Image (spheres, helix red, strand yellow):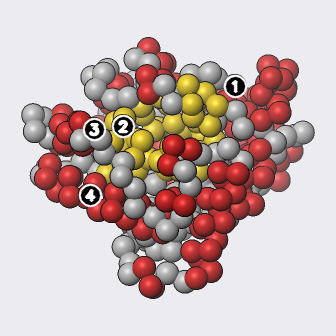
Amino acid sequence: MLYRRFGRTELQMPVFSCGGMRYQYKWEDVNPSDVPADNQANLEATIRRAVELGINHIETARGYGSSEMQLGKILPKFPREQLIVQTKVSPTADANEFRQKFATSLNYLQLDYVDLLGLHGINNAEFLEHSLRPGGCLDVAKQLQAEGKVRFIGFSTHGATDFILEVINTNEFDYVNLHWYYINQWNWSAITAAKNHDMGVFIISPSNKGGLLYNPPPKLVDLCAPLSPMVFNDLFCLSHSQVHTLSLGAAKPQDFDEHLKTLELLDQASEILPPILARLEEEAIATLGEDWVKTWQTNLPTWQETPGEINIRMVLWLWNLATAYDLVEYGKMRYNLLGNGSHWFPGNKADKLAGLDLKQCLAQSPHADKIPQILAQAHNMLVGEEVKRLSQS
């Protein structure tokens, strides 16, 4: 395993983290006796395999259902100083409720302290206010830190880049969990800002949210050769030293295997990546047109500024990926969260175009004339059954 300094925390963080979203039994708290023996055995085997590989950062959240409780049966079996344990608790208007939720987390984990506490889902101004106001959740987190129950404090976010920058620039947090990978590089300026503040940088779900790379389409496999799309994406992310760790979200012990192939390639990233990057860009241009590829995002309105609150940028982005790289299943998964994802995935689908006039909100876009047609194409391509976030399932 390779390790990187996790910003001001000075922790030696493995470049892969064992994220805790995919191996737990249920997305709500359950009685420990309700957990099937085979599910618990698989979780424990996954954690043992992670630690055996040097992936000693175990990441979970209060919002991940039975994950913390199930981890509490295995984590105390390891020497505590060998582990970096992170949990996350969503900020609330009532800071005492936040403290109580953290107490539940610590009790479930059966640990005296966590190394990293993340304020989970600071996605908009409301949750930032819950966090930063005097006596708010951040003050409680700092009290927990003074009590020795938390070593370092960070935040996780699915928010817009400008908002993430606002939170980072408060300089109140030691690290950030955010999205950034090959198919979605919008948050690079936030990563740069985190670097400037000497914050740790943890990338959320690069294999799942980064394109369902556990089951990539044949076209993407061909474009990423000789690497698998998963290893390509890992290498792309880790070739940037500002990125410290990638969450793997393992569901079983074998899920680490493909990722491990990345480690021996890191020193050669500058030779391996350029031909693949060029091929991916060339395919996008060949499929979508150079002018569109280079300017489609120019002067797009926010979803709040758009009639029907259509998240135009998100819809066009998913259409691009589905059209250029055959990421149709990924596009369907993400598209059908629109309208259901609350502050985690805001805005709506393009399903009510007939009754909307988009001329004014698109007036500054160089592609104003064709965007409505593409939105309609995207809807026809990607619509399916409504999807809930995993934690809502």
User: Which is more N-terminal, label 3 or label 1?
Assistant: 3
Q: Quadrant of the C terminus?
A: bottom left
User: Which is more N-terminal, label 2 or label 4?
Assistant: 4
Q: Mark 1 against mark 4, which lies toward the viewer?
A: 4
Measure the alpha-carbon separation of dots 1 and 3.
Answer: 33 Å
The answer to whether marks 1 and 3 mark residues whose Cβ atoms lie closer than 8 Å is: no
Q: Which mark is residue 151?
A: 2
Q: Quadrant of the N terminus?
A: top right
Measure the alpha-carbon separation of dots 2 and 3.
Answer: 6 Å
* Residue drawn where x is 51% and y is 59% of the image: 75
SS at badge 3: helix
User: Which is more N-terminal, label 2 or label 1?
Assistant: 2
Measure the alpha-carbon separation of dots 1 and 4.
Answer: 38 Å
Q: Which mark is residue 103?
A: 4
Measure the alpha-carbon separation of dots 4 and 3.
Answer: 13 Å
SS at badge 4: helix
Around disc 2, counting alpha carbons within 10 Å, would you say few (fewer than 14), some (14 to 19), or many (20 or more)? Answer: some
Q: Please give the residue where the numbered disc 1 appears in the rendered image.
A: 239
Q: Amino acid at mark 4?
A: Ala
SS at badge 2: strand
Q: Amino acid at mark 1?
A: Ser
Q: Please give the residue where the numbered disc 3 appears in the rendered image.
A: 145
